[in-house]
Image: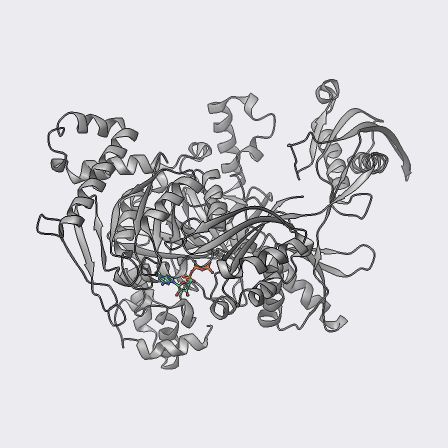
Amino acid sequence: MRMTVSHMRWSSKLCSGCTQCWKTRCQAEFRWRLQGNRNYSFLQEDVKSVRGVVSPDISKIRNIGIMAHIDAGKTTTTERMLYYAGYTRALGDVDDGDTVTDFMAQERERGITIQSAAVTFDWKGHRINLIDTPGHVDFTVEVERALRVLDGAVAVFDASAGVEAQTLTVWRQADKHHIPRICFLNKMDKPGASFSYSVESIKKKLKANPMPLQLPIGSGKCFTGLVDLVTNERLMWHTNSRTDDGRAFKSRPISSTDDPELHKEVKEARSALIEQVADLDDEFAELVLGDFSDNLDLMPLEKLQAAIRRVTLARSAVPVLCGSALKNKGVQPLLDAINTYLPAPNETHHDLLSCYKDDLCALAFKVLHDKQRGPLVFVRIYAGTMKPQSAVYNMSRNTMERMSRLLLPFADQHVEIPSLTAGNIALTVGLKQTVTGDTIVSSKSSAAAAARRAVKTHGKEQFSGREQETLVLVGVEIPEPVFFCTIEPPSMAKLPDLEHALTCLQREDPSLKVKTDPDSGQTVLCGMGELHIEIIHDRIRREYGIETHLGPLQVAYRETILQSVSTTDTLDRSVGDKRHLVTVELGVSPCAEGSSTAAPAISFEDSVEEQLPLDVKEAVENGIQSAYLQGPLLGFPVQDVVTTVYSVSIQPGTSMAMVSACVSRCMHKALKQAGGQVLEPLMSLEITANEEHLGAVLGDLAQRRGCIHEIQSRLDNKVVMASVPLAEMMGYSTVLRSLTSGTATFTLELSSY
Ligand SMILES: Nc1nc2c(ncn2[C@@H]2O[C@H](COP(=O)(O)OP(=O)(O)OP(=O)(O)O)[C@@H](O)[C@H]2O)c(=O)[nH]1
């Protein structure tokens, strides 16, 4: 059991034996105490009560992510949710470093989320599986992984800033996965917070259709509550939030005795909401124009809620709510909205799943390493039931694995369960080979049965002999790293330990790549940014006890070509008494302008495509792909190049490895002849600074080969949008801090090469 300083500190806040403590972070403390007393009975009783609620009805499950720009308040909002749902006994605070979901030491020290954490809790008869994702761009892959398995999301905004750079990125990611959302305008207590400004920025910058379901009462220091436009009620919290936990609040219907200005504002906003919903939903429009046209106030609450739900699920508009997580206001209505408006797992359409019927089908979306239990794999179950002590088949790796235990995740605490059904998120122990993005089913024969059903339903032509691969759930897109540096152990004796640590960390974090420099033989770490590499370095020290030395951080360049070239190559080799003979002819050409692609673009001449057997085609593709990995100039990956295969002739008996080797050699020759060019990563940079420091920031950007695209005003601040070569951005956070006395913030994201 892990005991941290924070765990120790919580002890003062513990109750001495309430039945809810199994759910809380106090559980760790509790178990520790009980084990100290050699008395396990209380804990076991508690765990039994969890079993009773293990598999809720699928319509009552909400798999939800919390996503936003860095520091918008995701973790604070999650903490409040856990507290109001009765799963923690004290309010965790990011600034005190005692939150449940940010449980890594680095997260608590830095006050940022690095890994997405899954927590499970119940709210008003619904099971909420919630994932708190990081806001920092270096950890984008965590957001991507989470979004892949979510059915809905809450986008949290800082109401004093509206839409910020990283909000745009996560919003686009959620769009890509067709995820219905709710917006939560947090920090309404901050000076400068503006509900209308934030709603407007959602409309303008995200090109979304915001649907305000609430109005704030006051803002900044005077933010005291909100009006629920759907129920037409006024919700008021205690003004002294320092002593009040916000659990209790008063609600009463809006009436003519209220402040006339507020009354008028609410009336107008509610009419606008009804009109907006009617415009987007025909069924509701009929009610508005028919039965209730005389008096919209008589519209039944359920009808309005059902229409808002349909509109949200269709993603034709996004409900907007507001509050202040830190000051304990507005979080319970947000939880209600998650239950009411976001989809259950059976309301999101997954084409493939009908092929599995009641057989197990799950997607592994995250791996954690636990010193005692080995790899812990987070899975989302899409069909069937998962049980511990059973063998499962990993379709993506074509291997059988044995799962020993099944757990329900509660941040860093896990509760053992006997089985879990479709729609849920679980944590498995025992899967040793599974990595992020793998599809898990019950057996090889169930995979084959699903493939047969798929062919029957969709027709054979859809699958072209690759039925099984097509039935693999779409995995997680991993971006290419932009930074790299060498890493050295303190002595050669520690090298195996370092290799083990890096293997474990890579399984946890697919955006971390490790390779060996072919010239120096040194180990090279490739990551998404300075912070990413710094955190990995720190984790190797803390979690694996190895003091490593990092070389200087370098930029991962790319290579491309300038002209089109065709060439041919023959490989004729005898191995033993077997002769391998291959001749290949291919051409490379630069991508058309505007169609830049990092993935290798490969095409075959029509006649070749028809004649080549599947295994030869795969061998040719492998050869081309391996040539793309190391360009001829400096050995960086090649991109923006299209390869066309004109002919392949093979003597019978030639191995596929020889075919790949010949193709790869021919590619190298072609790329060399085509005249290479090194590409450097260009970053989009967004800096928020006050007017006083703007001149210094712009002057510094000019020296860094920066190109300024736009300067916007955001309330009292200026927002500079620019693009800058990554090589010029090393250590920028320190420079910006000193230029602006620590008042400015920035986000950096790969734009292009
Ligand atoms: N004034 C005010 N501050 C808040 C509120 N919610 C959060 N904060 C503060 O904002 C800072 C960031 O809060 P977090 O909850 O860590 O934000 P986050 O979005 O999880 O941050 P990352 O995970 O690092 O992206 C902390 O200092 C919080 O105390 C709020 O409602 N009002």
In depth, the one of 101 and 122 nearer the eye is: 101
Across and down, in percent, residue 411 comes to 42, 62
Q: How many marks?
A: 0
Would you say 617 lies left or right of 720 here? Answer: right
Across and down, in percent, residue 105 comes to 50, 70
Residue at (27, 77) in percent of width and height: 16
Would you say 269 lies left or right of 371 here? Answer: left
Snapshot quadrant of residue 54: bottom left
Would you say 668 lies left or right of 340 here? Answer: right
Q: Quadrant of ligand 1?
A: bottom left
Which residue sits furthest top?
607
Across and down, in percent, residue 300 comes to 14, 37
In depth, the one of 650 and 236 nearer the eye is: 236
How does the figure colour the protein chain or chains? one colour
Residue 157 can be seen in this image = yes
From the viewer's perspective, is residue 553 above or below residue 2? above
Quarter of the picture holding the C terminus: top right
Across and down, in percent, residue 334 comes to 29, 52
In depth, the one of 81 and 583 nearer the eye is: 81
Which residue sits furthest left?
257
Snapshot quadrant of residue 580: top right
Residue 408 can be seen in this image = no
In depth, the one of 114 and 749 nearer the eye is: 749
Snapshot quadrant of residue 71: bottom left
